[in-house]
Image (cartoon, helix red, strand yellow):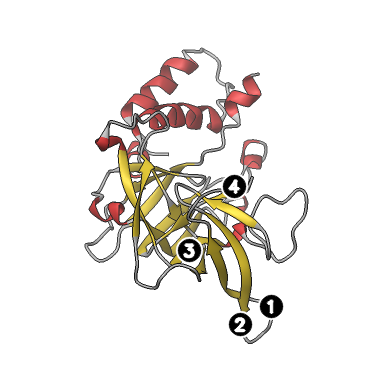
Amino acid sequence: MTLAGLRRRGVTSTAINSFVRGIGITGSDCSMIRLDRLEYHIREELNKTSPRVLVVMHPLKVVITNLESGSVLDLDAKKWPDAQADDISAFYKVPFSNVVYIERSDFQMKDSKDYYGLAPGKSALLRYAFPIKCTDVIFSDDKETVLEIRAEYDPSKKSKPKVLICFNYFLKLKFDCLKHSLILRILLKLDDWFADLNPNSKVVVPIAYSVPSLRNATVGDTFQLERLGYFTVDKDSTAEKLVFNRTVTLKDTYSKARK
């Protein structure tokens, strides 16, 4: 929680100042400020300043069988939710080919009424792209681990599946998903605070897939990765591999608690 650490994670001075103004001044020695209140102000700021982009953290290969191998369609995707169609700068390109990647959590073998993902025989709409229908599943030698999915896409977009999932192409990135270093009971038990260190405060995703436009990202650039959170390019990045730190998740518990 040092200022240097917050900056490296992509927290802006505007968000910190907004947080400080919001908590005000107190003479009490026992006041307690919830961490999610700081995250609320960070999220409010980054929502206005961070362009959206598609990234797949835990990729599952999907082969589109009715699309010619080697062909690539460049589709328009919005950097901002309210992007106007005539504003070219508010869009970026998402390549769509016969091989794409989806989040592994967006597929399961058994479908159910409360499951909003892809399953054998089920259709889903790829974000900014086309509806696809799972036609076959390829397993590893253990007959349980899914290696890849075979699917057909609907170029006419006549089918209207209710399921919407993200997909991606092939640019490989590294992500450090940073979480709280201390768990909440540190506030109640101070005699052995080493026991309250969160062993999962840093989760590294060594290879994730993204759109080619992220190749031009530079240190300090912050993006909202759709469905995943806000991430900032770390100074450990190289020309061969970009490294991203998670600034904050998309989930906002503070504003809900205030209601």
Where is mark 3, residue-wise? 101
Is disc 4 placed on a helix, strand or loop?
Answer: helix
Q: In the rendered structure, are the residues bearing label 1 and label 2 in contact, judged by CB atoms less than 8 Å apart?
A: yes
Where is mark 2, residue-wise? 140
Marks 3/4: CA–CA distance: 42 Å
> In the rendered structure, which disc, 1 or 3, sits on the residue that comes first in sequence?
3
Marks 1/4: CA–CA distance: 42 Å
Q: Nearer the viewer, mark 4 or mark 2?
A: 2
Marks 1/2: CA–CA distance: 7 Å
| Residue under the image location 63 percent in, 58 percent down | 118
Marks 1/3: CA–CA distance: 19 Å
Q: Amino acid at mark 2?
A: Ser
Q: Nearer the viewer, mark 1 or mark 4?
A: 1
> In the rendered structure, which disc, 3 or 4, sits on the residue that comes first in sequence?
3
Q: Residue 49: x and y, percent?
A: 34, 31
Where is mark 4, residue-wise? 193
| Residue under the image location 55 percent in, 50 percent down | 125
- 229 lies left or right of 115: left
What numbered label is drawn on residue 36? none
Q: Quadrant of the C terminus?
A: top right
Q: Nearer the viewer, mark 3 or mark 4?
A: 3
